[in-house]
Amino acid sequence: MFEATAQNRRNLKVEGLFRLLFLWMTCMLILPVALILGVLIVRGGPAISWEFLFTQPLNNMTAGGILPALVGTVWLVVVALIASVPVGVAAALYLSEYAPDNRLTRAINLAIINLAGVPSIVHALFGLGAFVIFFRFGTSILAASLTLAVMTLPVVIVATRESLQTVPLAFREACWNMGATRWQTIRKIVLPNSISGILTGVILEVSRTSGETAPIMFTGAAFFLPFLPQGVLDQTMAMSLHLFVISTQVPDVPEHMPFGVALVLISMVLAMNGISIAFRVYLRGRKKW
Amino acid sequence: MSAADPALPGAADASAAILVEKLNLWYGDFQALLDVDLRVRAGAITSLIGPSGCGKTTLLRSVNRINERLGYVRTTGSIRLWGLDVLDPSVEIAQLRKQVGMVFQRPNPLPLSVRDNVLFGTRVHLPDGRPPNRVEGDRIVEEALRQVLLWDELKGSLDRRGTELSLEQQQKLCIARLLPVKPRLLLMDEPCSALDPAGTEAVEELIWKLRGDYTILIVTHNMAQARRASEECVFMLLGEIIEHSDTASMFLNPANSQTAAYIEGRYG
């Protein structure tokens, strides 16, 4: 009565086949990541040293270090964050906590989706036209960071909004029913319980910003500038552009140098992601309902 | 301001905490309440009973105007609380909600400590224009938790999160949280339906104990509960009030045949 029939056996066989297929495809995901990291470590690892990280490039960028690019990337990221996080978080708060479901709201949502879909080179041209020329910031950290900020705004908005929406409606109702205003509800209940997700979004933005090349090429990043920026109106070198330059534009760069730059860049990004995950786990652990 | 304050308009009928007149309410095109007239006695427990969709929760939610948040709700008629029409445009919602506390079907303590849950209302409304200090806070918390019979259980764990308590404790905490801002009316939307029998009994006892100090309007699906834990009973059907009398006589001697059928469980 409980023996397998031929049909059962066929079903089991197909079941096993699909399971294997899906598992294999999942493993394929790991492959490129492992290969990229492996190649970078093997070929760029020998380039890494204190000297490489903390000295100026020499001999037409074929020797020396990457300090101006490293510092420049930090500048670009920090200024971009200062510009985009307040705007993005405020916009997400409006959309999630205040906005009625009407045409304007739908138009804003559509705009966000489209903004996320604009290719980065188009953002570069926009930044050149708007910030460099129209607002007369010149090619500067400010212009480049604002371009990056516009480009990454959707990331911040979407991450923040999703995080806000994980706070159950029942908490908001409880607050409103005690006569709390929307803002009191946000400040006392919604924000404290969604901050981990918002920070995750911010850190994601950091990792995305630090790797972008096209948007900063015309707006503020310099080909070669062997000193550190003094303010937001200076031009600067940046890791991503530096990698592009020494890989394609400068003859006779020793092979390990571009790999070294790439390794430093990807380590920065991975470190950011790591912090983001750790933060999330820490804050999640404190929240219980 | 006491319930019988003669300075209030409509105070001639001082024993009425809620006076609903010709209340019609539409959700979009659907009319959920039809010409509802209701007089709720101050200091008593009045239960609203009736089959699902009869409008009892809608009526309850109209009293503190929480329905309006939906946006597509339209109302005509009047709801007077101690003589003042709450549908009047000059009514400040925050003040209305302070006077009219609400307890939900699912306990919804905030993800804060027990202490902060109880003090939440005073922080929102700032009596004397400032949040209570440590000493006042302790006193307020103790008083509110004593009123809901939680003090002895929770006095040692005021820093626990409200969301970690048992459901029964959570629901009592949700009631305690309303008290520090001195509401006069408590609305309860099936407050026991998420609780087990022991929890139900405990919360019912609490509600019974609060009568007199507060006017309580309670929606329930549970006939036995309406019978045990209310003094007056209102039976609704399809958006209309069919019968309103004191609980004992409604259950012994329903005047309307539909009420009788519902009470006897012929539909529900």
Image: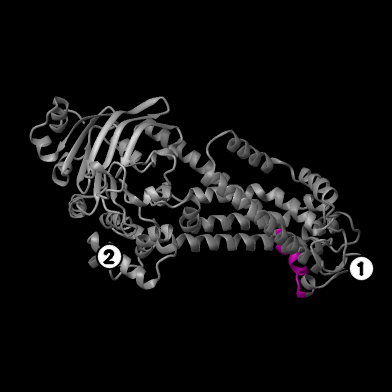
- Where is residue B74, by image quadrant? top left
Residues in magenta, as a range: A39-50
Measuring from the top left, give residue A186's x and y in whole percent.
50, 54
Q: Is residue A29 visible?
A: no
Outermost residue on the front side: it is B7
Mark on residue B14?
Answer: none
Mark on residue B143?
Answer: 2
- In the structure shown, which secondary structural element does the residue marked by tag 1 occupy? loop
Q: Nearer the viewer, residue B61 or B42?
A: B42
B234 versus B140 height, above or below:
above
Q: Amino acid at mark 1?
A: Asn
Q: How many marks?
A: 2
**Type of colouring:** one colour
User: Which-is-in-front pick, marks 1 and 2?
Assistant: 2
Residue at 40 percent across and 58 percent down: it is B111
Mark on residue A59?
Answer: 1
Q: Residues within 10 Å of mark 2 (few under 14, many from 20)?
A: some
Q: Chain of mark 2?
A: B
A287 versus B268 height, above or below:
below
- Where is residue A108, by image quadrant? top right
- In the structure shown, which secondary structural element does the residue marked by tag 2 occupy? helix
Relative to residue B129, is residue B140 drawn left or right? left
A275 versus B264 height, above or below:
below
Q: Is residue A44 magenta?
A: yes
Q: Residues within 10 Å of mark 1 (few under 14, many from 20)?
A: few
Measuring from the top left, give residue B2's x and y in whole percent.
27, 53
Magenta residues, dominant SS class:
helix
**Which corner quadrant holds the C terminus of chain B?**
top left
Measuring from the top left, give residue B138's x and y in whole percent.
33, 70
Q: Amino acid at mark 2?
A: Glu
Relative to residue A207, is residue A102 drawn left or right? left
